[in-house]
Amino acid sequence: MNQNLDGHSPKWWKKHPSARAKAEAVRASQAAMNTQPPNTQSNRLIYLRTIGFPAFCLAIAAVVMEVSFPMFVAFCYLALATAIVDSVLDVELGRFRYAMAGFLFVFALWFTFGFVIGTTKPTITSTWFAGNYAAGTDIDGLSWNDSWSELRLGIRDDSDEDLKDVDIELRPDGWMAEAKVVGDLCILAPGPTIAIMGTDQRGNQYRFSKGLSNHSYHLMCAKIPAHMDVWVVIALTNEDSRVIEKRKPDWITLRGKYKVKIRPYTLDIKVVPVDNDPLFMQKK
């Protein structure tokens, strides 16, 4: 057995009063540390630690939402899935982690059924009239010219949600003289003029007629309330003023965008106007 300088064994020194006093002081110090109040700031950070990466994904989703809705949805699901898994695995949260994971799961279901599943599209109707009104007749705010024909376009929201930030370009297969939106729910803004020219066999330029519009209009609405509609009256004219016969347009193109809740939609369709003039049908 090893002996120290005083000739006593290590076992003897462990039982010495000074050694016992030192051990008691160490135990008392440890007990005092264990009884200190917890670091509240540190515990609060535990609840915030799980939102770092999900918040980053949601920030990217917010940026791409207007550009690509599927990408927005993918980043949202990635953020929710990460937050749910991280919450369950974080044992420092205690039982609260299950409550947080359950809340995030319910939120994911609400997001799925409230925004992702299903689509909301307006109902589009279009009707053409020969418009044989007397010159100067007031047709929904238009002072009528007897050489015009009338094209009516209706955009109706049949859903239970409002259409917001509506901006739709209207371009009929014909030459527009004037246009007017009925009511004060929306406004019409003129679009750019289209002038596509061709060249005949002699080298002379000419303007294509059928299938082109001299300009377009943008229908802009801050909101189309649920179960309401907006009507636009378009006065069509002939490209050649010497032609008296009125022609029904073959189609009207609608291109634009709108939102339902936070979901953006795009619209790009052609609508065939319904001929609602019996006399015109008899002539055909």
Image (cartoon, grey):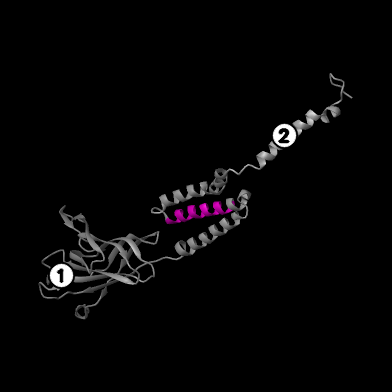
Residue 235, horizontal then vertical, whole percent? 18, 68
The part of the chain drawn in magenta is: 69-85
The spot of residue 86 in percent (x, y) is 58, 50
Give above or below for 189 relative to 275: above
Q: Which residue is mark 2?
A: 26
User: Between 114 and 271, which is closer to the camera in this rendering?
Assistant: 114
Q: CA distance from mark 1 to mark 2?
A: 102 Å
Residue 212 falls in image quadrant: bottom left
Is 76 one of the magenta-colored residues?
yes
| Between discs 1 and 2, the one toward the N terminus | 2
Under circle 1, the secondary element is loop
Q: Is residue 123 left or right of residue 88?
A: left
Mark 1 crowd level (few <14, some 14–19, many ≥20, 10 Å Cα): many
The answer to which of 90 and 227 lies nearer the viewer is: 90
- Would residue 45 be counted in the magenta stretch? no
Closer to us: 62 or 217: 62
User: What kind of secondary structure does the magenta stretch mostly adopt?
Assistant: helix
46 relative to 1 in the view: left or right: left
Q: Which mark is residue 148?
A: 1
Whether pointer 1 and pointer 2 mark residues with C-beta atoms closer than 8 Å, the reply is no
x and y percentages locating residue 282 in the rendered image: 21, 81
Q: Residue, x 58% and y 58% (percent of image)?
A: 99
Q: Residue at x 57, y 54 (%)?
A: 84
Instruction: Pinpoint residue 239: horizontal percent, then vertical percent.
Output: 16, 63
For the question of whether residue 212 can be seen, the reply is no
